[in-house]
Image (cartoon, grey):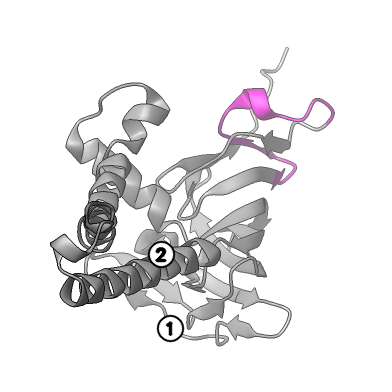
Amino acid sequence: MVLHKLREYWITIVALVVLTTIGFLFVMFPREENRWHGLLEAIFIAAFLTVTVDPFVKKRLLKEASQDIFHHLIGVDLPIEMRESLKQYVFGMKYYRKTLEVRAQAQREEDGRLRIHIRIEAEVIAVTKADYHQSLAFESSEDPRVIKMEARTATRTSEWAPRSPLVESKMDPMELVASNDPLPLRRGEELKSLFSFNIHGSETDFWVLHFGTTTLRTKVILEPLPDMEMFASDAGCRDRHNPNIYNYDEVFIKGDHLHIRWRPKEIPAAA
């Protein structure tokens, strides 16, 4: 890309030099004294077009090509609203998760309430220079407690201060939010992300994992209590040897989600 731009600059400089030289020759040697006058006119016109018209034509062609990129890739002419959304998603992606592991462990508190401990670990790769924003959002009815939230590179760390209060979202009442300071990333830099928190629910309930970042490989590990059973979305992704492990090979994008559900085990009727 840099070499391409330098080449364009040199072409422009050479064209300007040619324009100046030919202009000087036109002044010093009139048409009747210059047998090369016709050739010089042709070179002058070509150099003039290179300096003036060529950049605008290239810019216009690039703009039109970028507008129709999804038509050529997908093979259909999408409505402009869909094209703009796709373009915003593709060109707006700053980083992605290479791997994601979610562990959900059911626990029983002293007062008998059911608590689900969630631990989420991920590897994040920066596509371009960007700030990594780490955050969590809960329903207030889940009575959440953040234990640890950390984003770490080889040289820098952004960490949730223990026992910091959750903040109610201004856009969505009854939604509680926790967030860390943004962590700057260089292009290609790797980051380790960790979330650890508790939520509460009824004996038959569910929790939703919302994807806010494009994720390549996802693994869910469930740890139910002896008297209960737990499930994750898509039974077809269950491990053949352990029904409490789910492996997802599909790519999840922003807006996708997975459910984790639980219920008491059915007690066989007495004979």
Q: Relative to 32, does residue 81 appear above or below in the rendering?
A: above
Q: Quadrant of the C terminus?
A: top right
Mark 1: which amino acid? Pro
Q: Is residue 2 left or right of residue 51?
A: right
Residue lying furthest right in this view? 241
Where residue 135 appears, x then y in whole percent? 47, 69
Residue tagged by mark 1?
165
The disc placed on residue 197 is: none
Count of numbered labels shown in the rendering: 2
Pointer 1: residues within 10 angstroms few (<14), some, or many (20+)? few
SS category of the residue bearing label 2:
helix
Where residue 19 appears, x then y in whole percent? 27, 69
Residue lying furthest top in this view? 271
Can residue 55 be seen here? Answer: no
Q: Is residue 144 left or right of residue 268?
A: left
**Rounded to the nearest whole Å, what is the CA distance between mark 2 and mark 1?**
60 Å
Residue located 20% across and 77% down the image:
28
**What span is colored magenta in the figure?**
221-241
Residue tagged by mark 2?
11
Query: Residue 13, located in which quarter of the rendered image?
Result: bottom left
Q: Which of the two labelled residues, at mark 2 and mark 1, occupies the earlier sequence position?
A: 2
